Image (cartoon, rainbow, N blue to C red):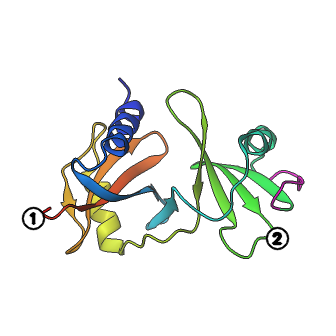
Amino acid sequence: MSARRAALAVLLCAALLPGVAFAQISNLLIQTLAGGGFRIWHADGVSILDDDEVMLLESLAEVGGSQPTATALGPARALRTAQGVIIELTERARDRELLVDRDACGHVKTWHAEGVTRLSEDQATDLVMAALPGGGPRLVLDAEHHAKSYLTNIGVMVAIWKPRSAGR
């Protein structure tokens, strides 16, 4: 099983086991930038394009950026980068970029430039350093959040959760 499939299988299992071990799951994708630092993508965001629009833009992607294409969210351009295809939503006030990803079955997944989960530079570094194809060790981010990071083809996928208190 590929590292990406293993990571997706673990995340899917965690989501399908309500009440067993996790509460309030959040997912991030961390990409290391060439000049240092990180680009953090969020699983959930406010800019939602349907799969047909994402696939069309993905097919039009060019290194310098495609011509603007009409979408439900206004004009969009697709850029082919070393980190993957990025869709720029030129007229959006928030969540202006989406990263195109595909799951193990080839289904389209978009990661959002903006989301509610925040990581410090130290936390992002720890998660990237701990990432393994089948999932690294559980890390404690703060008093309320734990995380596990997985190496994938396009970066480090991170599952963040609030552990249930022992008294429940």
Q: Nearer the viewer, residue 86 or 138?
A: 138
* Residue bearing the label numbered 2: 91
- Give residue 67's position: percent from left, percent from top: 89, 53
Q: Which residues are magenta?
A: 65-73
Q: Which residue is mark 1?
A: 167
Of 151 and 110, the residue lying toward us: 110
Quadrant for residue 73, please give it: bottom right
- What type of secondary structure mainly makes up the magenta span? loop
Q: Amino acid at mark 1?
A: Gly
In the rendered view, tell whether residue 80 sits above or below residue 103: below
Q: Which one is in front, 125 or 57? A: 57
Question: Residue visible at 48% across and 72% down?
Answer: 116
Label 2: element kind: loop
Badge 2, how many Cα within 10 Å: few under 14, some, many 20+?
few
User: Measuring 46% from the left and 39% from the top, which residue is drawn there?
Assistant: 153
User: Which residue is found at the position 54% from the left and 26% from the top?
Assistant: 105
